[in-house]
Each structure stands twice: as C-alpha cells, then as structure tokens.
Amino acid sequence: QVQLVESGGGLVQAGGSLRLSCAASGSIFRANNMGWYRQAPGKQRELVAIITSGGITDYADSVKGRFTISRDNAKNTVNLQMNSLKPEDTAVYYCNADITNWSFRSSVYWGQGTHVTVSS
C-alpha cells in the first residue's frame, strides 16, 4: 500500500508565497509522474502542475510563471512552490502520484488534500 501525505497549506495574503510538500511512502519501486491538482468550491478538480520522473514539467496556463514543481526521486517527494498568489488560487490542493510497486504494478494515488486560502 502507498500513502501520500501533504503539508504546507494555509492562509496567505495576495502576492504572498506558500510551499506545498508531498511525501509518498509504502511499497514503492518507482514513482512515475507526480503532480498537484486543486479543487475550488463549486468547481471541478483541475491539474495545476505535473513532473515526470525525468524532471519534465508542465503547468496549467493560470499558474505558469508563478508556480514551480520539483521532486526528489530518492525521497519520493514532490513540492509546489507557489509565488505571487492570487485569490483565485484558493482551493484544496491534492498531491497525485503514479506509483509502481514491488510487484511491478502501477496505480494512481491521491493525498488527503491541503487547504490554500489567499485573501485579497
């Protein structure tokens, strides 16, 4: 079994910064794509940023130039540095990871979510 544990959410003023972290633990042979999604009240969950095991990244247009995703393959962690935050970034942020276990089966896992609130 694999668990994803997030940390780093909170309340920040517009223009401020937050750093989210997510650690994967359990039966992990390899962490493949890892990413961050978010869900604002009354809206569907959307992709924020994704990073491959090789370090290739992709971002939602709404966060390009403000957010940076990074990972540590040795520690199976993924981070999201969020700068120049806007009120519209307010959401629950979820860590997501495609994990291959020691039986060489791949599954997608989700974290429990961490709240980010940006005040105007």
Image (cartoon, rainbow, N blue to C red):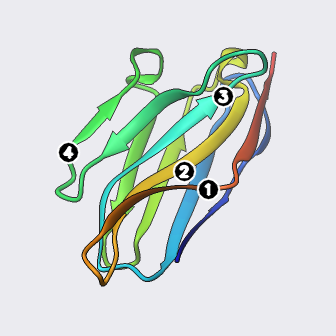
Which amino acid, mark 3? Gln
Residue situated in front as seen by the camera: 4 or 67: 4
- Gap between marks 2 and 1 measured at Cα: 5 Å
Which amino acid, mark 4? Ile
Q: Residue 95 carries which label?
A: 2
Question: Few, some or many C-alpha atoms within 10 Å of disc 2 (few <14, some 14-19, many ≥20)?
Answer: many
Which amino acid, mark 2? Cys
Q: Mark 3 points at which residue?
A: 39
Q: Earlier in the sequence, mark 1 or mark 3?
A: 3
Question: Where is 50 relative to 106, above or below?
Answer: above
Question: Few, some or many C-alpha atoms within 10 Å of disc 3 (few <14, some 14-19, many ≥20)?
Answer: some
Mark toward the viewer: 1 or 4:
1
Q: Earlier in the sequence, mark 3 or mark 2?
A: 3
- Gap between marks 3 and 4 measured at Cα: 24 Å
Q: Earlier in the sequence, mark 2 or mark 4?
A: 4
- Given contact means CB atoms under 8 Å apart, are the residues at marks 1 and 3 in contact? no
Q: Which mark is residue 111?
A: 1
Q: Residue 56 carries which label?
A: 4
Mark toward the viewer: 3 or 4:
3
The residue shown at (61%, 56%) is 111
The residue shown at (38%, 79%) is 28
